[in-house]
Image (tube, helix red, strand yellow):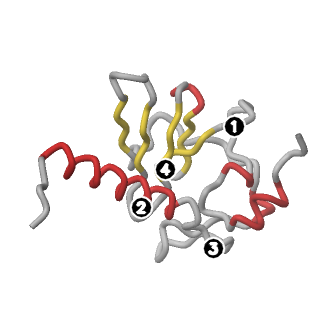
Amino acid sequence: MANVTRRNFLQAAAVAGGMVGLAGCNAGTGTTGSAADPLAAPAADKYPIDPDGEKVEAKWSSETSRKDKWTRVTNPDGGAELGVMDTAKIIQVDGYAFKDMNGNGKLDLYEDWRQSPEDRAKASPSP
């Protein structure tokens, strides 16, 4: 029988949680959104998308690490888990959290984790 300590258990749970979060990065299908599938991505011609107004309730949650000051953002319904150092980079669309990587205050197609990796790569700005 293995010697399982609380610390070992918590470390294993953190690794497993991180793997689930990475799997959420590919949650998008590249289809248009619908009420039946809250994580369905909008059509490509709908971008850029303005963030939600102040009256839209956030579906996501966040927690900040005391040690390194990173903030983990968790989206529900199998959505992506994000990590940010600067919470000003978080924008909310349809109640979900996204990283505003280019700082334009809007959700661009390549920033939308609901889109397929292929579509995001095609829409990504050149370095």
Say which of 66 and 99 sits in front.
66
The picture quadrant where one finds residue 119 is bottom right
Label 1 close to label 3 by CB (< 8 Å) = no
Label 4 close to label 1 by CB (< 8 Å) = no
Indicate whether 92 appears above or below 12.
above
Whole-percent x, y for residue 33 in the image: 59, 69
As drawn, is 4 to the left or to the right of 74?
left
4 or 1: tag closer to the N-terminus: 4
Which quadrant: the C terminus?
top right
Mark 1 to mark 3 CA distance (whole Å): 21 Å
Mark 2 to mark 1 CA distance (whole Å): 22 Å
> How many circles with numbers are drawn on the protein?
4
The local secondary structure at tag 3 comes to loop
As drawn, is 44 to the left or to the right of 95?
right
Mark 1 residue type:
Met
Q: Residue at x 12, y 48 (%)?
A: 5
Residue at mark 2: 20
Label 2 close to label 1 by CB (< 8 Å) = no
The picture quadrant where one finds residue 68 is top left
The picture quadrant where one finds residue 40 is bottom right
Residue at mark 3: 29
Q: Nearer the viewer, mark 4 or mark 1?
A: 1
Estimate how packed mark 3 is, as few (under 14), some (14 to 19) or many (20 or more) residues with alpha carbons within 10 Å: some
Estimate how packed mark 1 is, as few (under 14), some (14 to 19) or many (20 or more) residues with alpha carbons within 10 Å: some
Say which of 120 and 91 sits in front.
120
Residue at mark 1: 101
Mark 3 residue type:
Thr
Dot label at residue 96: 4
Q: Residue at x 35, y 58 (%)?
A: 16
